Image (cartoon, grey):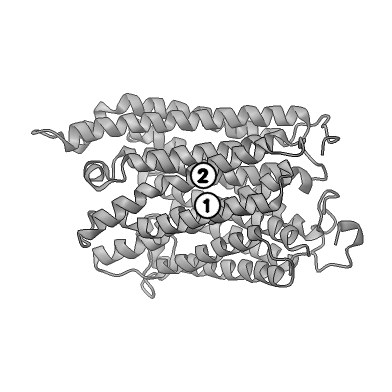
Amino acid sequence: MSTSTTAVLDTPRGVEEHAATRLKYRSQAVAKPYFIAAIGLFFGQIVFGLIMGLQYVIGDFLFPEIPFNVARMVHTNLLIVWLLFGFMGAGYYLIPEESERELHSPKLAIITFWVFLVAGALTIVGYLSVPYATLAKLTHNEILPTMGREFLEQPTITKVGIVLVALSFLYNLSMTVLSGRKTSVSLVMMLGLWGLAIFFLFSFYNPTNLVLDKYFWWYVVHLWVEGVWELIMGAMLAFVLIKVTGVDREVVEKWLYVIIAMTLISGIIGTGHHYYWIGTPGYWQWWGSIFSAIEPIPFFMMTLFSFNMVNRRRREHPNKAAVLWALGTGVMAFLGAGVWGFLHTLAPVNYLTHGTQLTAAHGHMAFYGAYAMVVITMISYTMPKLRGREANSRGAQKLEMVSFWLMTLAMVAITLFLTAAGYVQVSLQRMGTTPMPFMVAQDHAATYYWLREASGVVFFIGLALYIISFFVKGKTDEAAH
């Protein structure tokens, strides 16, 4: 059913009026506010990242207005929320096209958007305006205590809201898939999204025993980023590559099945590499080391997949920037999640490195390469269509490509400088006969922290150029499509 033959839709006023002529289904337009919110929250995340970077070297910067623990909490929570907005926008665009039918309820999608945005904004305001303990009292955390854990600091009422938003989102997409065409891309996407929602439920289980707490905490954090999120990433990347290369869907699906099989095999049991030093049985050192050593393989396969599809392309798509982001996703995901993850994943190495700046180096490049870049890939491909054109203008794409290289090279630099700081930290604080105190070792790494901050400024400039690129007008070459 194309836009020209679509019957009257259950589409909100404004969304229907703004439905872009390039969209195959009008209801795909509901993805646009999700993508705009994602980029806005991404911008906020980087601002707080720069604040934290300065606080590493200027300890009282913005104190007591924004203490380091609050800046860190906002930085990591914004990361999670903007990626979720990106995943949801991708789902609302991808699923109708793969299912060959309109979204089950565009109105519900818009309501869900505003509920999620307001809840997220109020939570961030709460972090910044009152002490965390006060926020816990104000939100009656004592009724069902869930607060106080890294990445899951949200008040219980916010967590309940996230669950309701997720159920609404999944109901909307599931009904769309069930009543339309089923493809490997849509089924993998739905499996990842349902897994995301199911594993988040462990955030409500907060045992008083610290070992149990960390054990189940990793059920959320690890099984998200090293499990079901990888399925979402694979589906999004496959969707874009099918569209921009014209490669047969059967070829893409074979790659996708192999990648997700390796992801699930290595990722689920690989959760054990987080259990080395939290009081769990010693066999986790073997299980965790072996299976987490396998985890780089699906990321390497994703890199091969991306380049293979582009090399076999049957068309020259006018959106060159989206192709660049897709290729960059494979490479950076492999480097960040694969190589830097493997550097410190084996138990004898992790004994010295866990909780150091090496962890931060891995985390920064992995989140950017695997998830930030795939969301940007999806936005880069879909946003022009949501605005009524096949691709952005040549000038806009050139600026977007400049932003790609600035952000990507800056993230490589951030990772290298954090790796160097981690080496200093491990060698001075955790090795030798006279290890230094934590803060003394940190002083020795100050140069690397300054260089990391400078790289962060370059990344911020790249992100600003990326946003500006959407406002650049000019000619575009659509004849090749």
Q: From the viewer's perspective, is 277 left or right of 400?
A: left
- Write the residue at 84% across / 36% down: 478
Q: Position of residue 283 (x, y in %)?
A: 22, 59
Contact? badges 2 and 1 (CB < 8 Å): yes
In the depicted structure, whether residue 428 falls above or below residue 65 = above
| Residue 61 makes an appearance in the image | no
In the depicted structure, whether residue 26 falls above or below residue 22 = below
Q: Quadrant of residue 402?
A: top right
Q: From the viewer's perspective, is 248 left or right of 219?
A: right
- Write the residue at 73% across / 72% down: 179
- Report the Cα–Cα distance between label 2 and label 1: 7 Å
In the depicted structure, whether residue 285 falls above or below residue 355 = below
Which mark is drawn over residue 301?
Answer: 2
Residue type marked 2: Met
| Residue 120 makes an appearance in the image | yes
Q: Position of residue 380 (x, y in %)?
A: 68, 41
Residue corresponding to mark 1: 259
Total numbered labels: 2
- Write the residue at 53% across / 47% down: 371
Question: Quick one: label 2 or label 1, which is nearer the N terminus?
Answer: 1
- Write the residue at 23% across / 57% down: 278
